[in-house]
Image: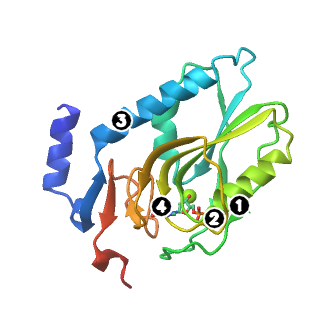
Amino acid sequence: MDRTHRQQQRRASGRIDQDIAEVLIDEDAIARRVQELADTIARDYAHDEGSRLVIVPVLTGAFMFLADIVRDLPHKIRIEVVTVSSYPGAATVSKGAALVGVLPKALEGRDVLILDDILDSGQTLGLLQDEIQNRRPRSVRTCVFLRKQCPRTREVTCDYVGFDIPDAFVVGYGLDFDGFYRNLPYVGVLRREGIAP
Ligand code: IMP
Ligand code: MG
């Protein structure tokens, strides 16, 4: 069974899709944009002859974006994951960011590319950029799949942005609500009943 057919079947029986009020970015648009981003990144790091590029994805939200984008990169790269907690449980507003565990050690002298699912208040990426700079890398850049149009607690520069989206709470393609919906292959807005306690 091919992928499209399987997806149609999944939707028809879809327990997860019925919680979605609106599809904001569909799978084809995601695939096209991720490929464009990978092409741009590949060009920008074309000089990387010493295999210095380290991708630092922020778990858990970046896992799907990570898997798609690294498969389109031609470099010999390392992947060093970090975990940052910002939303305890079923909250939809950030309560500040905290690093969970320790940063990978081998960042000194490397070209670090931080990968996150979404830029919202800016606290997560701000914290990580500071912590990673302290490790004396050769360069630090940041790539986000989504950038929300909303006021930021902290202004953060992103070098690569997949999509700019309105100020709504979105799920899918790695993004969750209370741990659910990360496995949706598209980005959608939850029905209000899904968010309300
Ligand atoms: P920030 O620290 O407020 O920029 O938030 C970044 C983190 O909050 C992201 O890595 C996401 O895990 C989470 N987040 C922010 N907005 C959303 C959303 O709309 N849906 C799901 N998770 C989100
Ligand atoms: Mg996250």
The local crowd at label 3, few if under 14, some if 14 to 19, many if 20 or more residues have their Cα within 10 Å, is: some
x, y percent for residue 179: 46, 65
Question: In terms of sequence position, does the residue under pointer 1 or pointer 4 come before the other?
Answer: 1
In three-dimensional space, the C-alpha distance between marks 2 and 3, rounded to whole angstroms, equals 27 Å
Circles 3, 4 touching at the beta carbon (< 8 Å): no
Residue that badge 3 annotates: 31
Above or below for 188 versus 111: below
Circles 1, 2 touching at the beta carbon (< 8 Å): yes
Eye-nearest disc, 2 or 3: 3
Residue that badge 1 annotates: 100
In three-dimensional space, the C-alpha distance between marks 3 and 1, rounded to whole angstroms, equals 30 Å
Residue under the image location 61 percent in, 50 percent down: 58
Task: Check the picture and name the quadrant holding the N terminus.
Answer: top left
**Left or right of 139, for residue 160:** left
Residue that badge 2 annotates: 85
Residue that badge 4 annotates: 149
Question: In terms of sequence position, does the residue under pointer 3 or pointer 1 come before the other?
Answer: 3
